[in-house]
Amino acid sequence: MLTAITGINWGDEGKGRMVDLLSANYDIVVRYQGGNNAGHTVVNEKGRFILNLMPSGILRDGVVNVLGNGMVIDIKHLVGEIERLRAGGITITPENLKISDRAVICMPYHVSQDILEEERLAEKKFGSTRRGIAPVYADKYFKKGIRMGDLFELESLKSRLADIVEWKNLTLSKGYGAQAVSAEEMYAHIVEYGTQLLPFICDTGAYLDKAAEEGKNIMFEAQLGALRDVDFGIYPFTSSSNTIAAYAPIGAGIPNRKLDNVIGIMKAYSSCVGEGPFTCELFGEAADKLREAGSEYGAATGRPRRVGGFDVVASRYGIRVQGADFIALTKLDILSYMEKIPICVAYEVDGVRTQEFPIGAKLDRAKPVYEYLDGWMRDISGCRKLSDLPENARKYVEFIEKSVGCPIKYISVGAEREQYIEV
Ligand code: GDP
């Protein structure tokens, strides 16, 4: 069975935690896009782990983890992540970690370029995570990328790298006026970190195709939500990759295969890290309380996230572009302190009420239409069945389910592995 597990909102929906829970039934977990620009936080019996590049299945014994060709990989970061996980008692070998030979390497000059551009933009900045992701994806499509498989052919890599560095310096030193990058240093970087990863690099598409043929259960794990997809998200405040489920077979290396189902992870309220339109945003004390309650600070950057009530318009749209078959609703317990729970049920654009998600300047002008449901004001983190939930919590879940038009199959009421309800 091929299942994608994807975010319905702006990211940070608690996907890592759901993948950790659901990966019990899967043989393989695959990351198919993005790099180390976001972080999953997973808490289980082994401890608390932040995963930037690694699929969440790495925390389960016996699960094979794949970094697909759709990813961009900072090799120094990956080596560090492997070391940190090993120090936490996690076993990582070529048996349980496989890296695509077609994934593109995120180089130090991509990080520099990212930072230089954010600094140039100053007040107009996009809120990049400064991990080099936009420059490395741009270079991939510019056909100036270096791929993981190139690490096996160091001689030819060395001469290609020299050409690429010469080209990159046109931007870095001649364009931004920054210090030029040295081809020798970049080669030394690749040799130092890349060679440590060689045992893990292979044709992961061939591996996954064979595994699918054998009937293995494969889970595709997205980073960031639907609204960060470069085609369908809040462009240009998106990530640089396709986060949607439809891209999973491509970014994993098995474009010949179809997904059997798509699980959408949707948070019981909204959060958005960085700049860009966020119609349902709350401000002041209401925002501070929700941010504190939900610990809404970036896992990769520590940045405070913007927060809002559940957004019906954005979530309905997210469900559509993901093609979600059902929903796992996360962090319901966070709302337990609220007397009245705000839900953004529609947008108002130029005086017209709508439930269609707008784009561009129209989205910038959209105003939220808020309704309020009664809260339950009780700790629900111990609930394990739907009937354990207070009536108002059930009503809240039913309201959301009806508004977005997609069945909610799981409700998570805490960060621990067992703190969830199967509906
Ligand atoms: P991800 O990138 O989508 O995995 O999202 P985050 O890194 O923001 O993870 C969500 C955070 O919320 C992590 O610290 C999780 O441990 C935590 N979390 C996930 N689900 C729940 C939940 O249902 N309740 C609570 N209280 N915390 C949760």
Image (tube, helix red, strand yellow):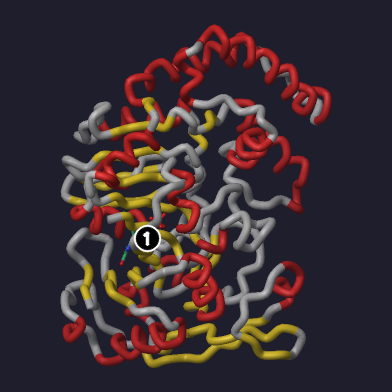
Residue 167: horizontal and vertical position, in percent?
75, 22
Instruction: Inspect this view and state whether residue 286 appears.
Output: no
Q: Quadrant of residue 209?
A: top left
Q: Quadrant of residue 353?
A: bottom right
Please say if 377 is above or below 192.
Answer: below
Q: Which one is nearer the viewer's eye here, 315 or 395?
A: 315
In the image: residue 91, left or right of residue 154:
left
Please say if 43 is above or below 374.
Answer: above
Residue 175: horizontal and vertical position, in percent?
82, 29
Q: Secondary structure at mark 1?
A: loop
Please say if 164 is above or below 303.
Answer: above
The type of residue carrying mark 1 is: Gly
Q: Which residue is mark 1?
A: 14
Q: Which one is nearer the viewer's eye here, 12 or 372?
A: 12
Quadrant of the picture in which ligand 1 is shown? bottom left
Please say if 24 is above or below 409.
Answer: above
Q: Which one is nearer the viewer's eye here, 121 or 155?
A: 155
Instruction: Inspect this view and state whether residue 409 appears.
Output: yes
> Is label 1 within 8 A of ligand 1 (CB to nearest ligand atom)?
yes
Residue at 41% x, 69% y: name it.
324
